[in-house]
Amino acid sequence: MRVLIQHLPRDSAFVRAVHGEDAEWGLNEHLMAAVVDHLAIGNWLFTSAHLPEDESPPEQPRPVPRPGIEEDPVEEATPDDLARFFSGL
């Protein structure tokens, strides 16, 4: 019985009941979300680098929400934070 339960597909009712929302995402879904996140950041960096100086950069893209992971607020570095970081080099 243990072997049968261990090898149930992740979309089975038992696995969803035990693992909840985490069971819906497998390796493929996590990899695809990482690809989307990296493409979004790359496009944002390209766009930000090619804007005229008088325009403000677009908002940084948010990562694809993943089950079981709370979204952390984006903290922006102050000029003092940057000076402290680069003075240590």
Image: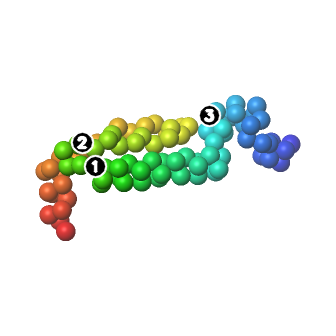
Which residue appears at 35% of the width and 50% of the height?
47
Residue matched to label 2: 56
**Residue 31 on image: x %, y %:** 58, 52
Q: CA distance from mark 1 to mark 2?
A: 8 Å
Q: Image check: 77 left or right of 15?
A: left
Marks 1/2 in contact by CB < 8 Å: the verdict is: yes
Q: CA distance from mark 1 to mark 3?
A: 40 Å
Quadrant for the N terminus in the image: top right
Quadrant for the C terminus in the image: bottom left
How busy is the neighbourhood of tag 2: few (under 14 within 10 Å), some, or many (20 plus)? few
User: In the rendered image, is residue 2 in sight?
Assistant: no
Instruction: Look at the picture and state if 5 lies above or below 13.
Output: below
Residue matched to label 1: 51
Label 3, secondary structure: give it: helix
Task: Specify which label sits upstream in the sequence, 2 or 3.
Answer: 3
Q: Image check: 83 left or right of 7?
A: left
